[in-house]
Image (tube, rainbow, N blue to C red):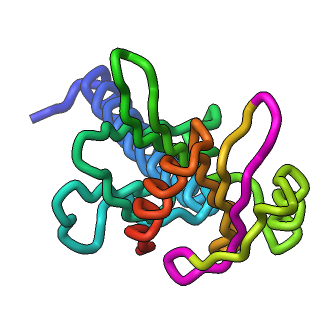
Amino acid sequence: MRIKPITIVALIGLIIAGVSFYSDKVSTSKQTTVADTQAVKASPTTPPATPNRELKPNERFIGTAGLYITTPEGMTFREEKAVDDPGIPRTASFYIEKTDNDEITYQLYGLYNISNSASNDSLEKSKKEMDPATVEDITMGGYKGIEGLVLGQKGRYMTVIVKDGKLHSFSTYPPTAENKEITDQILSTISFQ
């Protein structure tokens, strides 16, 4: 049986196309693997997004900050994240609020700044915003920090800690003695993963 020259050319063409397709696929796969590895290296170190233990009643887990916190009965909880263009979290924040006739009577605002480093100097800078007569050293979840009353238009009680080189701040509004007591109770429930 004799094979026609056109069949040989077609067969060679198919072999070349198959080898070319396979080599492109392998090359693309390697490029994707390298890009994925680089993306992992470029992303900041953040705790897993899921808790490593079962949550207690009314307890919330803010995965980006690795923080557990309990919301009192009758209050609402919401969480927000600010993300950079490549999808890397920049900040994580949460609110615990109580309202009366659509007016906020209590608000605890927590902010975790992922993208900026912090140190004890950050605590000293935070003190400058506070009324010196109200500044106190505190410990929260095993980490040292400060708290005090911030005066002015955006008056609030503020608590700040530095954990693993990152700043965690907690602000209470309106800054009343009753609201500070509520915040002290909520902050006493904080633990970290």
Majority secondary structure in the magenta region: strand
**Segment tinted magenta in the rendering:** 140-153
* 140 sits left or right of 25 in the view: right
Confirm whether residue 89 shows in the render.
Answer: no
Residue 160 % position (x, y): 68, 62
- Residue 50 image-quadrant placement: bottom left
Q: Quadrant of the N terminus?
A: top left
State the residue in front, 4 or 168: 168
Determine the residue positioned at 67% across, 43% down: 156
- Residue 10 image-quadrant placement: top left
Q: Is residue 121 above or below residue 108?
A: below
Residue 38 % position (x, y): 62, 57
Asked whether 146 falls inside the magenta stretch, the response is yes
Determine the residue positioned at 56% across, 51% down: 177
Determine the residue positioned at 41% across, 60% down: 186
The mark total stands at 0
Confirm whether residue 36 shows in the render.
Answer: yes
Residue 44 % position (x, y): 62, 59
Determine the residue positioned at 77% across, 47% down: 150
Residue 84 % position (x, y): 64, 36
* 113 sits left or right of 50 in the view: right
State the residue in front, 103 or 82: 103
